[in-house]
Amino acid sequence: MPENIADLGTHPVFVVLLSYLLGSLSFAVIVSRFMGLSDPRSYGSQNPGATNVLRSGNKTAAVLTLLFDALKGWLPVYGLMKYGAAYGLSDGTVAMAGLAAFLGHLYPVFFKFKGGKGVATALGVLMGINPLLGAAIVLTWIGVAWFFRYSSLAALLSAILAPVYYALGGDAAWPLQNPILGLLCVMGVLLVWRHRENVNRLLAGKESKLGSKKETP
C-alpha cells in the first residue's frame, strides 16, 4: 500500500482503476446526447460505438465518437509508456492499465456494464504502445474492409494480427513473459468474442457490407 496520499496517484492499483473508469466513458452515448441525437443503443445494432452512431446519419458524431473512444485507450498507455518508469511502474502496469481501459469500454460501470465492441479503444491502446503498430493495424483494417467490404471481418483479422505484428517487430517472447504481448493476445480474444454474432452472420452470409443501406433511427 502507498505510504502517503502523494504516492497513491502512482500506485499500480490506482492507475489501473483510473484507466478502467476512463474506459467506462461511453462516448457514443455522451456525444449523441450532447448533439441531440438518439441513443445509439436504441437503433441499428444497438452497439454504442462509432459504426452504429454513423447509422444516425451524423458523420461528425461518428468521427467524434471514434476519436474519443480511441483517446481513452491511448491516454493511459501512452502516459505510462512515457513516464511510468520514472515512478517505478513497469510494463506489467502498462498492460493492466491498457486492458482496464479496454474492459471499461466493453463493460462500463457508468452504463450498467453494457458497452461497445472495443475496436476504437483497442486501436488507441495499440497507438499508445507503438504508433507504427497502430498504423499497421489501421492499414490492415482498411485493406481487408476495402477488399471484402465487411467492417467486422476487418476488425476480426486486425485483432488477430496485432500480437503477430508486435512479435514480428522484434519481441517474440511468450505472452506470460511479455505483459504487452499478453495484453494484445487477451484483447484479440475479447474482440473476437464481442464480434461472435458478426462471425455467425459472416458464416451464414448474412453480414451487411460496407456501403449497403443502413437502418436509421
Image (tube, helix red, strand yellow):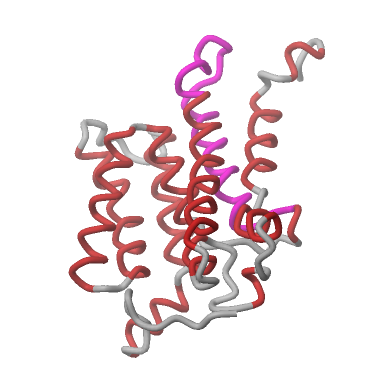
Query: What range is drawn magenta here?
Result: 80-109
Q: Above or below — where is 194 with respect to 19?
A: below
Q: Percent from the top left, x then y, of residue 71?
A: 52, 40
Task: Specify the principal SS of the magenta part.
Answer: helix
> From the viewer's perspective, is 2 left or right of 87?
right
Q: Quadrant of the N terminus?
A: top right
Q: Position of residue 34 (x, y in %)?
A: 69, 54
Q: Quick check: 209 above or below 38?
A: below
Is-magenta flag for residue 77? no
Q: Is residue 38 left or right of residue 123?
A: right
Q: Position of residue 27 (x, y in %)?
A: 62, 53
Instruction: Locate residue 153, reporting x and y percent.
Output: 32, 69
Q: Does residue 103 belong to the magenta stretch? A: yes
For the point 50% across and 48% down, the residue is 121
Residue drawn at 46 percent across, 52 percent down: 120
**Residue at horizontal 45 percent and vertical 74 percent from the top:** 196
**Residue 167 occupies quadrant:** top left
Q: Residue at x 31, y 48 (%)?
A: 162
Quarter placement of the C terminus:
bottom right
Quarter location, residue 171: top left
Q: Is residue 210 left or right of residue 101?
A: left
